[in-house]
Image (tube, helix red, strand yellow):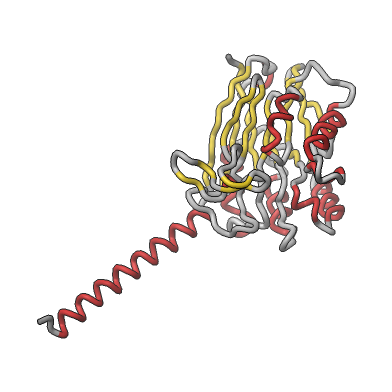
Amino acid sequence: MVNLKSWKAIITKKYILITMIFFVVVVFLFSQNNFIMVNNMNLDFRDLPKGFDGFKIVQISDLHNKMFGSNQRRLVAKIKKAQPDVIFITGDMVDSRKYDAKPALILIDEIIDIAPIYYVTGNHEFRLAEFSFLMKEIEKRGVNVLRNSSEILEIDGDEMRIIGVDDPTTLGDMFDEEKNLAVSIDIAIGENEEGYFDLLLSHRPEYFPIYAESQMDLTFSGHAHGGQFRLPLIGGIIAPNQGLLPKYTAGVYTEGDSKMVVSRGLGNSIIPQRIFNRPELVVVTLYRGN
């Protein structure tokens, strides 16, 4: 027969165990949404212009109103530490379901003096009634907003082209996004089609075959949120416009001579929790090689 003291001891142990498990789960879930991971990538290209050997790029994507400390302190510190030559922002810095421009604008204010910033729209920016106002505020801060346009970077006489395209729904025909993207790339390139090493900024990774067909050397995308929940040997579980077990969620993809970097992003949208998929800051260094 178990006495009262023994029962109390058993209940106490179970209570302590449950409390510890609850605490561990809460800390884990908090870390998955708030502890930024810096993903350093070194990419080799035999056609990279010599002046850009060692060129460093920081990619920011899918902030979705997220704050990382006062004035984005924790995120800004990691960007500064990376010492980039250029910063790419690949869309969805705001969330159309709960519009708040402050987190994005605060971040831009804090990093605008670190390196030149190039920005392309995501689907969430496009949905906003405040779209024009937001674009003006971003451009006013000195950001290069690429809307189906391109710019040439030059180092020691060597040139590289940065191309930026709008989210494909911006052309109005939501049922032919592939055609819209191909048209946007053609518009951005204009008549100067050949002879450049091309970096493309485009929010949607699921259209990588179009980027490869357009002979983009390297594309930067986001949108997939890393698949939201990631599992070993499986990868991302679900992504916008790709559904279950999406193909393009994180890291580097190759098709022919074309590569694509997909950022897991920093914030959340419909699903508020990440699992084994911490917020990501991508740092890419380009090298001449085989």
Residue drawn 75% across and 49% down? 123
Q: Nearer the viewer, residue 100 or 17?
A: 17
Residue 118 in sight here:
yes
Residue drawn 16% across and 85% down? 4
Where residue 272 sits: x, y (%)? 58, 59
Residue closest to the far left:
1
Q: Please identify the quadrant where the N terminus is shown.
A: bottom left
Residue 145 in sight here:
no
In the displayed structure, 242 sits above or below 188; it is: below
Q: Nearer the viewer, residue 115 or 133?
A: 133
Residue closest to the far right:
191
Where residue 43 sits: x, y (%)? 58, 25
Q: Nearer the viewer, residue 64 or 74?
A: 64
Report which quarter residue 68 is drawn in. Answer: bottom right
Q: Please identify the quadrant where the C terminus is shown.
A: top right
In the displayed structure, 247 sits above or below 103; it is: above
Where residue 282 sits: x, y (%)? 59, 39
Where residue 63 sits: x, y (%)? 66, 51
Is residue 1 toward the left or the right of residue 213 in the image? left
Count every numbered label the image shows and give the total: 0
Residue drawn 67% across and 15% down? 47
In the displayed structure, 253 sits above or below 62; it is: above
Report which quarter residue 23 is drawn in. Answer: bottom left
Is residue 85 toward the left or the right of residue 230 in the image? right
Is residue 204 toward the left or the right of residue 27 in the image? right
Residue closest to the far bottom:
4
Residue drawn 85% across and 55% down? 133
